[in-house]
């Protein structure tokens, strides 16, 4: 397979780079089972049908999109599948595989699209190995609504390249990450610490600003700061946090007290205070 490589040893797969090495026959001849037909699974299943794929699905609470063959259980949905997409939740990832395992044919690819811990993805792979079923860890790198099967994916696992070949042939966007099941989601979760942590900090700060009567001012201030971010910003944030931990610990202690006085629980502010105190004491 011809592919491009970046410095993180990712392998980007595009429709132009798919060859017989990754797709042994027309991807539209693959039978695909979708377990979980909620917001993400339903939209992906709809796109697969629209692209000409043979799709069957099961969800105990949601009716499948038009064109998806209805099945009555997880095991029923996967019994004739070449590729299974588990798109339910991290809590349901293991039960879905357990319910399906006896019905899976040897050689089937089980693609787990749930945002679960790396250890859980590794456990799925270990469980399926005894049935000659390969688990591919699929990390969805942006929200599915509006993108469907074109949602950018980072994938890892024994047959990640095979999954990428099929998925890109159907119109998807996949980057292969070297390593076992768990490697892809591990990278996504590290990124989530930043993205979701930043979002939580903004939500908390704006709630306090609303209580203080200056939410428009703070919103504009935050927007200006975010617009100016570049590669140097990361160094400034990291180096400044260590260098000025003593002063900033006091600052965030004061901010924590202010939020409480405004009736806002300072979850993020208190966490920042505690981190700075730890760094200060380590100096």
Image (cartoon, grey):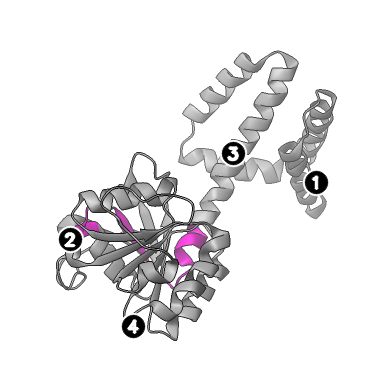
> Which disc number belongs to residue 106?
4
Give the foreground label among 3 and 4: 4
Residue at mark 4 to residue at mark 2: CA–CA distance = 27 Å
* Residue for point 35% across, 39% down: 146
- Whether pointer 2 and pointer 3 mark residues with C-beta atoms closer than 8 Å, the reply is no
Q: Which residue is mark 3?
A: 198
Please check the rendered image and state whether residue 214 is part of the magenta-colored stretch, yes or no: no
Secondary structure of the residue carrying numbered label 4: loop
The residue depicted at 28 percent of the width and 48 percent of the height is 66
| Dots 1, 3 in contact, CB < 8 A | no
**Residue lying farthest front?**
72
* Secondary element type, mark 2: helix
> Which-is-in-front pick, marks 1 and 2?
2
The image shows residue 14, relative to residue 197, as above or below, that is below
**Percent from the top left, x then y, of residue 1?**
20, 69
Q: Label 4: few (<14), some or many (≥20) within 10 Å?
A: some
Mark 4 vs 2, N-terminal side: 2
For residue 277, the mark is 1
In the rendered image, residue 154, in percent from the top left (x then y), is placed at 39, 58
**Front one among 221 and 34:** 34
Mark 3 in CB contact with mark 4 (< 8 angstroms): no
């Amino acid at each position: 397979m011809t592919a491009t490589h970046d410095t993180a040893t990712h392998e980007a797969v595009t429709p132009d780079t798919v060859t017989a090495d990754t797709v042994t026959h027309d991807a539209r001849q693959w039978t695909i089972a979708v377990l979980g037909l909620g917001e993400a699974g339903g939209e992906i299943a709809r796109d697969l049908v629209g692209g000409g794929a043979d799709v069957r699905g099961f969800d105990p609470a949601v009716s499948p999109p038009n064109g998806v063959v209805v099945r009555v259980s997880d095991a029923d949905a996967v019994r004739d599948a070449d590729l299974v997409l588990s798109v339910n939740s991290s809590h349901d990832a293991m039960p879905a595989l357990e319910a399906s395992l006896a019905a899976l044919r040897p050689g089937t690819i089980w693609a787990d699209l749930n945002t679960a811990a790396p250890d859980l993805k590794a456990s799925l792979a270990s469980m399926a190995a005894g049935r000659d079923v390969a688990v591919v860890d699929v990390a969805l790198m942006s929200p599915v609504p509006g993108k469907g099967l074109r949602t950018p994916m980072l994938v890892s696992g024994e047959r990640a390249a095979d999954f990428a070949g099929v998925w890109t042939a159907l119109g998807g966007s996949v980057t292969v990450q070297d390593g076992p099941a768990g490697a892809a989601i591990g990278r996504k979760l590290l990124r989530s610490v930043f993205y979701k942590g930043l979002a939580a900090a903004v939500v908390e700060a704006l709630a306090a600003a609303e209580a203080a009567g200056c939410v428009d001012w703070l919103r504009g201030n935050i927007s200006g700061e975010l617009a100016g971010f570049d590669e140097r910003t990361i160094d400034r944030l990291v180096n400044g946090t260590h260098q000025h931990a003593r002063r900033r610990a006091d600052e965030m202690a004061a901010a924590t007290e202010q939020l409480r006085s405004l009736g806002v629980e300072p979850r993020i502010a208190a966490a920042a205070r505690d981190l700075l105190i730890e760094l200060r004491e380590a100096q």
